[in-house]
Image: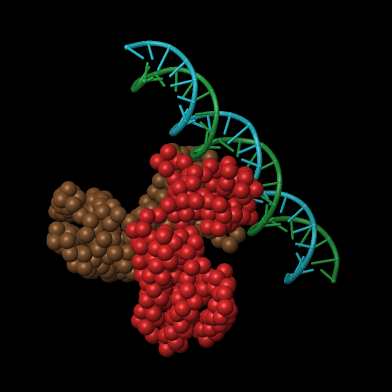
Chain colours: A brown, B red, C cyan, D green
Amino acid sequence: MSRASDTAYQKIRAFILQGDAFPGMQLTEEKLADIAGVSRTPVRDAVQRLENEMLIVRSESKRLSVADWSDGEIDEMFTLRAMLECHAAERAATRMDAKSIGLLSQFNDDLKEAISQKTPDIKAFLDTNRKFHDMILERAQSPRLSKILPALIEQPVVRRTADQYSKDDLEQSGQDHDELIAAFEAGDSRWAGAVMTSHIRRAFHTFSVAAGEQED
Amino acid sequence: MSRASDTAYQKIRAFILQGDAFPGMQLTEEKLADIAGVSRTPVRDAVQRLENEMLIVRSESKRLSVADWSDGEIDEMFTLRAMLECHAAERAATRMDAKSIGLLSQFNDDLKEAISQKTPDIKAFLDTNRKFHDMILERAQSPRLSKILPALIEQPVVRRTADQYSKDDLEQSGQDHDELIAAFEAGDSRWAGAVMTSHIRRAFHTFSVAAGEQED
DNA sequence: GCGCCTTCTATTGTATACAATTGCTATGCG
DNA sequence: CGCATAGCAATTGTATACAATAGAAGGCGC
């Protein structure tokens, strides 16, 4: 979309993901327009996008609020993500080239670098991790997947618990990525898919533990 | 969405699916506004929805056109649909109730009725078929799936070749549905998932043959 | 005091006018 | 004659004013 529409999307998204928003919080188009610094028209575009990503929900009377997910929905979200990222990895494995694999290695080096410190740089970790997965999605060369998957990936609940991940968890991610790269180099799509599946399922497990502890 | 926005969506969708639109055809918001009989504002909402369903694409310069899918994309579409409908069937199998199963049976009776004539009523077939699948999706009780799947289901290319399906193909669909119902009654989610997968993959095969013949 | 109806207010939906951008065409120069 | 460029036309993007609708509050009768 266009400039105002995009900035609205980004600012509202940031407001929900990292800002002062809380699940269930009521929103109005006008308030969001203030936050984004634009008029309601581009805000409505942005809201529709965020609604598709299920970060925002509309009540039956068209009022907006910040999405609040049940445990079941989070579970389902990870399950779908695992299925689709597995599929993406399988496709990518048959469509890789040397340059892309090189980039993947580089991203993963950056990722390891980010968590090698005594206090891991979570933000850098999430950032390079996203780049890594985006690269695979790009190599999957499926417009459909590219439309569906991103909405399942970066999510508020995940973000909110990310800084509780242990160093071991983070390092395991790096190792998964290494194995993915090996599978890509071998052009073995089933291997790549299986590693990706276990990578996501482990992430879910790690998240569950962190989320459980957060409750206490 | 609201009234004008909804009618815009439906009319534009009908225009693409059943109207005079052709793949690659250039569209302007104003023309679509004329077709829908509303102003550009609700049209933009509708267009965004259709863009998400990939019925409409925007060029890099934001101009709109009717989507034109490659064979590879159609293939991928069926693959994703098979994966996700399989998952939906698996979930539904553990969440069924007698009333819903009764409705499924009724829908399938209607479907068989529609194709029992010498010249099958394709429109009625597609209609009851959609009801059947919608019911399963509803019982899967997954908001995410409900958001993702519909965009993969009713598609122009499929619609365009539907009237070439043989009576055998249509009857096989009815039998698949019968077996799905049996799996639901047994509460066997793996069974339900497997039947659904083969149901969709067969549909893809049937479509491929029909589409191939259409080219000649 | 309780419940229902009415009125008012807050919020979303739509249209329209205008701004910005993009593509196209024509014209001039080499 | 070809190409670059300037200006024009067409299209999309944004803001704002107004319409419609849903929710809240207050008043009235019972």
Q: Residue at x 25, y 63 (%)?
A: A90
Can residue A117 be seen here? The reply is no
Q: Residue at x 39, y 80 (%)?
A: B195
Q: Residue furthest bottom?
A: B186
Report the quarter where the C terminus of chain B lies.
Answer: bottom left
Can residue A13 be seen here? The reply is yes
Q: Residue at x 47, y 54 (%)?
A: B55
Number of marks in the image? 0
Q: Residue at x 39, y 48 (%)?
A: A14
Which sits in the foreground, D2 or B127? Answer: D2
Q: Quadrant of residue B193?
A: bottom left
Report the quarter where the N terminus of chain B lies.
Answer: bottom right
Which sits in the foreground, B78 or D14? Answer: B78
Q: Residue furthest front?
A: B216
Q: Quadrant of residue A192?
A: bottom left
Which sits in the foreground, A1 or A36? Answer: A1
A62 displayed left or right of A38: right
Position in image of residue B164 (x %, y %) = 48, 68
Q: Is residue B34 above or below residue A212?
A: above
Position in image of residue B91 (x %, y %) = 41, 77
Q: Is residue B131 above or below residue A61?
A: below
Position in image of residue A204 (x %, y %) = 29, 67
Q: Is residue A97 above or below residue A79?
A: above
Position in image of residue D1 (x %, y %) = 36, 20
Q: Is residue C24 above or below residue B186?
A: above
Q: Quadrant of residue D25?
A: bottom right
A147 displayed left or right of B115: left
